[in-house]
Amino acid sequence: MTDAAAIGVLAAFAAGIVSFLSPCVLPLVPAYVSYIAGESYQRRRHLHAQERLAALGMSAFFVAGFSAVFIAFGASATALGQLFLRYRYEANLVAGVIVIAFVPGCAESARRCRSAAGWCWSLSASR
């Protein structure tokens, strides 16, 4: 692994740790563990090794499923970005047509607003 790749992996790992320890996520961990284990905290202290391994296995499958979904989202976003990059000129034309298509709606909205409020825009400097 090159030095730049190693730095990227370490930065991603550090960002994951920081996000896990954030005030938004850390308070949810006990509830998540209780849900996966299917037991309350008092009962969980007295679980046997087999029950703990079952909870660990369910946690691993949860993390694997969660990771698969977000990896798929990231891969599809990357593919869509590459598609837009490849067809950048055509995408600019389509976006321009969409913007032009919205102009009459915006003009009508401004006209209704002016007539309802009783004011008018003026292009001249003197008012």
Image (cartoon, rainbow, N blue to C red):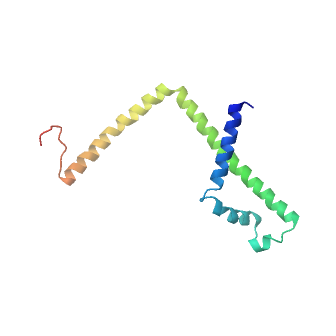
Total number of numbered discs in the rendering: 0
Judge whether 64 appears above or below 45 on screen. above
* Above or below 101: residue 28: below
Please provide percent x and percent y for residue 88: 49, 27
x and y, in percent, of residue 33 in the image: 73, 63
Q: In this view, does 65 lie above or below 107?
A: below
Identify which residue, 84 or 104, lies in the foreground. 84
Residue at 24% x, 50% y is: 113
Q: Where is residue 3 in the image (x, y as percent from the top left)?
A: 71, 32
Q: Position of residue 102 (x, y in %)?
A: 35, 39
**Which picture quadrant has residue 11?**
top right
Quarter of the image where one finds residue 59: bottom right
**The N terminus is located in which quarter?**
top right
Q: List the single residue furthest toward the left.
A: 126
- Side (left or right) of 11 relative to 52: left
Taking the image as shown, residue 55 lies to the left or right of residue 101, namely right
Say which residue appears at 35% left-offset and 34% top-offset: 100
Question: Which residue: 20% across, 50% down?
Answer: 115
Q: Is residue 93 above or below residue 53?
A: above
Residue in front for this viewpoint, 27 or 4: 4
Q: Can residue 40 be seen in this view?
A: no
Where on the picture, by quarter, is residue 55?
bottom right
**Res. 52 visible in picture:** yes
